[in-house]
Image (tube, rainbow, N blue to C red):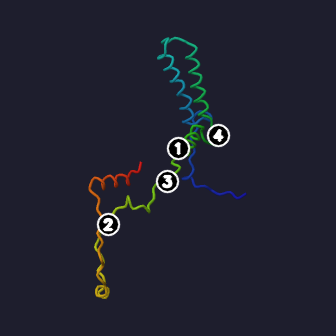
Amino acid sequence: MKMTVVPAQVTTVEDRIIGNLGFSQILLLIVPVFAAAGIFVLLPPFMGGALYKYVIMGVVALLFGLLSIRIKGKIVALWLVTVLRYNLRPKYYLFNKNVTAGRDEYHGKAVAPEAKEATEKKPVKKTSLNQLDIPTTARILATIENPA
């Protein structure tokens, strides 16, 4: 098997602070401690023990403990963020650059036609188009810009 050298700029190594735990894992394990203290103080009976408080504290500690587990070098919380970003991304692209509704119109200088073409042109019969009144035009343009 061929081994390739990866430059140091490309790799990122998470620092280990306590044993095999990184900074983000320690943060994920400290959050339940403060959450449990808040639950103990704020929920009735205030500053007293109750079974439902201990259940909530245990569930929060279990949840954050599971999020701090490392799988394939990444924390479960990071895997969860990656999967959620993938599943929440737009699935259909509605932009179509071939539609003329959203294009900017550039009215620049027209190129001067050659003298030969000017002499050979025949008069063109102009046809008049029925024009819409202003409210109808505004409604149609609004419908084109926002069909919903």
Q: How many angstroms separate mark 1 from mark 3 (CA)? A: 14 Å
Q: How many angstroms separate mark 3 from mark 4 (CA)? A: 33 Å
Residue 146 horizontal side relative to residue 67, left or right: left
Q: Identify which amino acid the numbered label 3 is placed on.
A: Tyr
Asked whether 137 or 81 is in front, the reply is 137
Q: Are marks 2 and 3 in contact (CB under 8 Å)?
A: no
Q: Is residue 19 above or below residue 12?
A: above
Residue for point 29% across, 69% down: 128
| Nearer-N-terminus badge (4/2) | 4
Q: Position of residue 116 (x, y in %)?
A: 31, 88
Q: Are marks 1 and 3 in contact (CB under 8 Å)?
A: no
Choose mark 4 or mark 1, whichever is in front. 1
Q: Position of residue 140 (x, y in %)?
A: 34, 54
Pointer 4 residue: 71
Q: How many angstroms separate mark 1 from mark 2 (CA)? A: 38 Å
Q: How many angstroms separate mark 2 from mark 3 (CA)? A: 26 Å
Res. 17 image quadrant: top right
Choose mark 3 or mark 4, whichever is in front. 3
